[in-house]
Image (cartoon, rainbow, N blue to C red):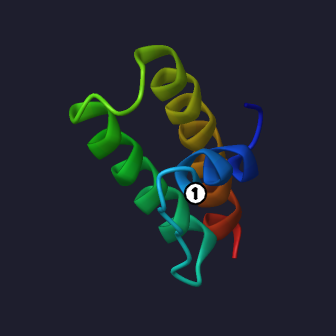
């Protein structure tokens, strides 16, 4: 798992499709859904940590880009 796309594919395995129309919101919702899966023991710690790390990095990039405009 190396990208937001990969995290999206992981969520799709659980029937979760995220599209809110703004990348920043999509990433935040994906993070919320990951946390819920982990809390309910549907996702192991390793995959959760990797996916969450990817989303955190992308969210920081997205916020930097949005603050420039």
Q: Is residue 45 left or right of residue 69?
A: left
- Relative height, residue 45 to residue 30 (above, below): above
Q: Secondary structure at mark 1?
A: helix
Q: Please state, as top left, top right, bottom left or bottom right, where the C terminus lies in the image.
A: bottom right
Pick the residue in front: 31 or 39: 39
Q: Position of residue 9 (x, y in %)?
A: 67, 51
Q: Please state, as top left, top right, bottom left or bottom right, where the N terminus lies in the image.
A: top right
Q: Is residue 3 left or right of residue 17?
A: right
Residue with the most extreme left position? 40
Q: Position of residue 66 (x, y in %)?
A: 64, 69
Residue plotted at (47% across, 52% down): 14
Residue plotted at (35% across, 33% down): 42
Q: Position of residue 33 (x, y in %)?
A: 37, 52
Residue with the most extreme top position? 46
- Relative height, residue 33 to residue 65 (above, below): above
Q: Position of residue 15 (x, y in %)?
A: 48, 61
Pick the residue in front: 58 or 41: 41
Residue plotted at (42% across, 20% down): 44
Residue plotted at (63% across, 35% down): 54
| Tag 1 residue | 12
Pick the residue in front: 31 or 12: 12
Residue 45: quarter of image: top left
Q: Is residue 14 left or right of residue 9?
A: left
Q: Is residue 43 left or right of residue 46?
A: left
Q: How many callouts does the rendering have?
A: 1
- Relative height, residue 21 to residue 1 (above, below): below
Mark 1 surroundings: few (<14), some (14-19) or many (≥20) residues within 10 A: few
């Amino acid at each position: 798992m190396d990208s937001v796309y990969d995290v999206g594919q992981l969520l799709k395995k659980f029937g979760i499709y995220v599209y809110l129309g703004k990348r920043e919101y999509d990433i935040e919702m994906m993070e919320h859904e990951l946390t819920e899966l982990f809390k309910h023991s549907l996702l192991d710690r390793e995959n959760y940590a990797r996916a969450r790390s990817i989303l955190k990095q992308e969210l920081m990039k997205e916020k930097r880009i949005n603050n420039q405009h």
